[in-house]
Amino acid sequence: MAPTPRAPIIEALRKYIANGTVRFHMPGHKGGIRNSVLTEFLGNEVFAADVTNVPGLDDLHQAHGVIKEAQDLAARTFGAEYTYFLVNGSSCGLQALVTAVCNPGDRILVPRNLHRSILSGIILSGAVPAFFLPEYDYNYGIPLGTLAETIQKSLAQNPDTKAVLLVNPTYHGVTSNISVIAEIVHNHNIPLLVDEAHGPHLGFHEDLPPSSLRQGADAVVHGTHKILTAFTQASMLHLQGNLINRQRLEAALKLLQSTSTSYLLLASLDAARADMDINGKQLLRNCLELSRYLRENIRKCAGLAVFEEEMTGRPGVFGLDPIKITISVKELEITGIIAEQWLRDHFDIQVEMSDLFNLLLIVGPGNSREDADCFLKALETMIKAGLRNLQDNSIHKIMNSITLMPDIPELVVSPREAFFSQAVSLPLREAVGRICSETVACYPPGIPIICPGEIISKDIADYLVLVRDAGVHMQGCSDPSLQNILVVKE
Ligand SMILES: Cc1ncc(COP(=O)(O)O)c(C=O)c1O
């Protein structure tokens, strides 16, 4: 395929700006007002390009002009039959997919480590989730990929399932065997949906795992802004095959996306695709070289460990995206959270994420060798500083508590019903036997312990107390100290 230098949305914007059209249309800034605080900060150009659906441009909800052309080019680049641009993040693509494939009461198979936007899609659509567990690495305390056998077993247990959704790659870059899973799912004549928010670059270089689309997934959501060069919130949804009703999906997208579509976001998607066509392989070669350099040097640092490609082949690690670098700081007897803060305070370095044991880096096309050297110098200095905030026995206490993670609790009402029910806050121990109306998660294990609609068993309450008292930072719950939990009012 010959690279295309075309970027239809950007071309249309240039033309509109060059015309010098007198603007009596939205937005109110009319292309930029002098002396505005934001104009002073960002310059005038950005305002000139901030238009919405005017003649000469297009309408995302009824794309027929430059947006359609740009989406068609993206479909060709990413290997889809149809591509939809998303201006409300990957979240809205995932919500639209769940809404498109599930009627109220329909079952969908989802991983327990799902992103909360999928749970939002389940609440919006009234779908009923059947959860499966991904594999797990207890040393790093991170969820891995999903085994094909897990999907096979879950489908046998839930024969009425309407769709299967996977996260591939995981936040930490671990991939699953999508080809085999797609075959299993298609044998049930239902679609495989993939949250590939962290993998829009997969398949663009031989040293990267293949993309889910190439391996037979029916629908894939890409966080184009997360790894490639689009603006934050700009994502894509790709579709192929005939297992998903396209009209229904388009209706769901209309339901969820803004009608005042930002052309800055759309232009950034058009440009990110063009960058991949023109220069994608070189951009990724640079990222891969930089991550190799970082990995080699981090591995040499005493007290640090890196989740490596050597893990590939063990259960749950079909492949690894090397540009995601998971660094365990556990041996230094500090938490990842303290390490993240130290790097920010002393070197102005901001990592993607930290948890109790790890730091997570994403190496992107915008990173340079100077960035890598700055990070390595910072690590060296941090190790020399000899910080300590985690005693060895507390690490073991936390590790033990993760391995005691109870089974997925019983779902007794749909997440939608739990969401719309009146909730009351109860002390944890008093909540045993009640229906939970919120999600409680922490890193590690990075897998929600309880979700809306599930029964709080004694085992679950004991586990929540265990991780809470071990000092793990709780996420998503109404009471961050987890003394209390929200339950459905009886
Ligand atoms: C795995 C995964 N899926 C979906 C999303 C949602 O993406 P967005 O922030 O673009 O809405 C995220 C966000 O971090 C994510 O990590």
Image: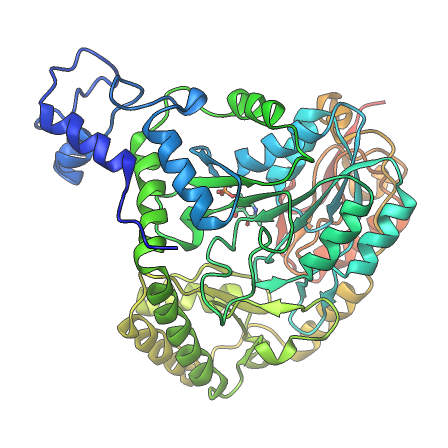
Where residue 300 appears, as percent x and y from the top left, is 47, 88
Looking at the image, residue 37 sits to the left or right of residue 456; the answer is: left
Specify the quadrant of the image occupied by residue 205: bottom left
Quadrant into which the N terminus falls: bottom left
* Residue 233 in view: no
The residue drawn where x is 13% and y is 38% is 43
Looking at the image, residue 358 sits to the left or right of residue 231; the answer is: right
Q: Camera-side residue: 361 or 263?
A: 263
Q: Camera-side residue: 489 or 265?
A: 265
Looking at the image, residue 108 sits to the left or right of residue 209; the answer is: right
Where residue 445 appears, as percent x and y from the top left, is 69, 59
Where residue 377 appears, as percent x and y from the top left, is 34, 80
Position above or below: 447 against 39: below
Where residue 150 appears, as percent x and y from the top left, is 82, 57
As drawn, which residue projects farthest toward the front? 1
The residue drawn where x is 64% and y is 32% is 121
Position above or below: 405 against 50: below
Q: Camera-side residue: 187 or 148?
A: 187
Quadrant into which the C terminus falls: top right
* Residue 22 in view: yes
Specify the quadrant of the image occupied by residue 480: top right
Q: Camera-side residue: 228 or 398?
A: 228
